[in-house]
Image: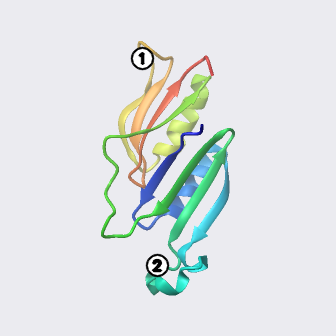
Amino acid sequence: MHLNAYLNFNGDCEAAFKFYEKCLGGKIVVMQRHGDSPMADHVPAGWRDRIMHARLDIGNAVLMGADAPPESYQRPQGLYVSVGFAKAEDVDRVFAALSDKGTVQMPAQKTFWSERFGMFVDRFGIPWMVNCDPTL
């Protein structure tokens, strides 16, 4: 079984996934636009460049997403994308990169359970937790 996060965006999925690819060192393997799909003729002209499905492979992990229709988009609540690293310096590096122009909720710091842990909402409105777990 594979369990993956699927993120919805308010028209900035492509920019978000290019940002995540850069920050996390992964590879975008799918960036499907509505206008390139068999349903292209049934999509409003303003939606043809919006992303219908994106996939970012990061090692053995997968992050997926799409642009949600404006009438159904809601900012994420009640969830975080959680990323773990074996080394504290990797937490610091990724935290600094992903949280740039976002809102830090808890700076990356030592906690009673981890050498380094931090929380933020990135510039695209996605909540993240970054944690150091030496068992990885």
Residue 19, x across and y down, in percent: 56, 54
Please say if the residues under marks 2 and 1 sit with CB atoms less than 8 Å apart.
no
Q: Amino acid at mark 2?
A: Trp
Q: Nearer the viewer, residue 93 or 122?
A: 122
Give the secondary structure at mark 2: helix
Q: Quadrant of the N terminus?
A: top right
Q: Secondary structure at mark 1?
A: loop
Judge left or right: residue 40 versus residue 26. Answer: left
Residue 44 location (% of width, % of height)? 43, 84
The residue sitting at the front extreme is 1
First-in-chain label (2 vs 1): 2
Q: Which residue is label 2 attached to?
A: 47
Q: Quadrant of residue 109?
A: top left
Which residue is at the front of the view, 79 or 92? Answer: 79
Disc marking residue 111: 1
The percent position of residue 28, horizontal first and vertical second, equals 66, 56
Above or below — where is 106 with respect to 56? above
Kind of residue indicated by mark 1 = Thr
Rendered location of residue 103, percent (x, y)? 36, 44
